[in-house]
Amino acid sequence: ARHRGGGRVNLIAMEDGSVRERLHKGIAAHTPIDGAPGPCSHGDGGVDGPRIEAAIRELLIGIGEDPDREGLRDTPSRVARACEEIFGGMREDPDSHLRRQFHEPGNEDMVIVRDIPFVSTCEHHLLPFVGHAHVCYIPRDGRLCGLSKIARCVSGYARRPQLQERLTAQVADALCRELDPLGVLVVLEAEHTCMSIRGVKSSGAQTVTSAVRGAFRNDPKTRSEALRLLGLPTSVRGG
């Protein structure tokens, strides 16, 4: 195990653009990162626009609408174009953003990027879930990536049919693969419209998931400090 004292925490609030705050703390007993699975597979090419248009036309007929009336005539093509963006993450490698790295030898200070906005699609009902991601990692010997690259990685994994639990783990494991950090902590908070507009109709209910790797899993003090800085309960353990 490696020990660092008197380090600093780099705390970045993404929601307000360039707001940055530096805090000071000591980091205890970092252990090597846990093993991570390989990257997930990605789709090829763009969406099949004509097939989506035909499916949406059938959907409109199925709910009792007239797809040829003025207000709906262009809806199938609009939905097809929207799918290009909503599911655009299927045609990219989100890990690639993290490969733009730089080095500051000896730097093993905690880096936190919080309040990264994301929108994803629940694969069970194809309805959106919307929230914020909080990402924290401890670099290994100054191996760092650009802060915006972390947000792009989150977006790449979010823009596809997803489960929040899977999305959380994918972001954490991407950081493990590409940066080999001493520790990673990812927390996602989101509202699922499949709960708020149908079924139980629990508007405002928040789902919180976490993925904990390396030093954050093995060192309770380091984990608690990161969660405190994020304003989250220090009892979160994650998968």
Image: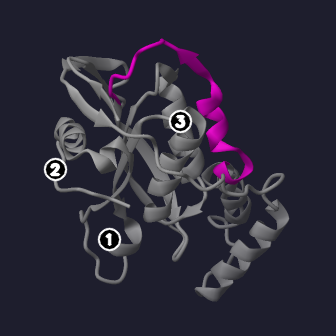
Q: Is residue 134 above or below residue 20?
A: below
Query: Mark 1 packing: few (<14 Cα in 10 Å), some, or many (20+)?
Result: some
CA distance for labels 3 and 1? 38 Å
Answer whether residue 91 is visible to the viewer in this image. yes
The residue identified by callout 2 is: 234
Q: Which element carries disc 2, helix, strand or loop?
A: loop
60 or 151, which is in the foreground?
151
Disc on res. 180:
3
Q: Position of residue 129 (x, y in %)?
A: 42, 60
Query: Mark 3 packing: few (<14 Cα in 10 Å), some, or many (20+)?
Result: many
Task: Reply yes or no: does residue 109 show up in magenta.
Answer: yes
Q: Position of residue 63 (x, y in %)?
A: 58, 85
Q: Which element carries disc 3, helix, strand or loop?
A: loop
Query: Mark 2 packing: few (<14 Cα in 10 Å), some, or many (20+)?
Result: some
Identify the image quadrant of the C terminus: bottom left
Residue 27 figure quarter: top left
Residue 207 figure quarter: bottom left
Q: Nearer the viewer, mark 3 or mark 1?
A: 3
Disc on res. 196:
1
Q: Nearer the viewer, mark 3 or mark 2?
A: 3
145 or 163, which is in the foreground?
145
Q: Earlier in the sequence, mark 1 or mark 2?
A: 1
Q: Where are the magenta residues, as a range?
A: 89-111
Q: Position of residue 175 (x, y in %)?
A: 52, 40
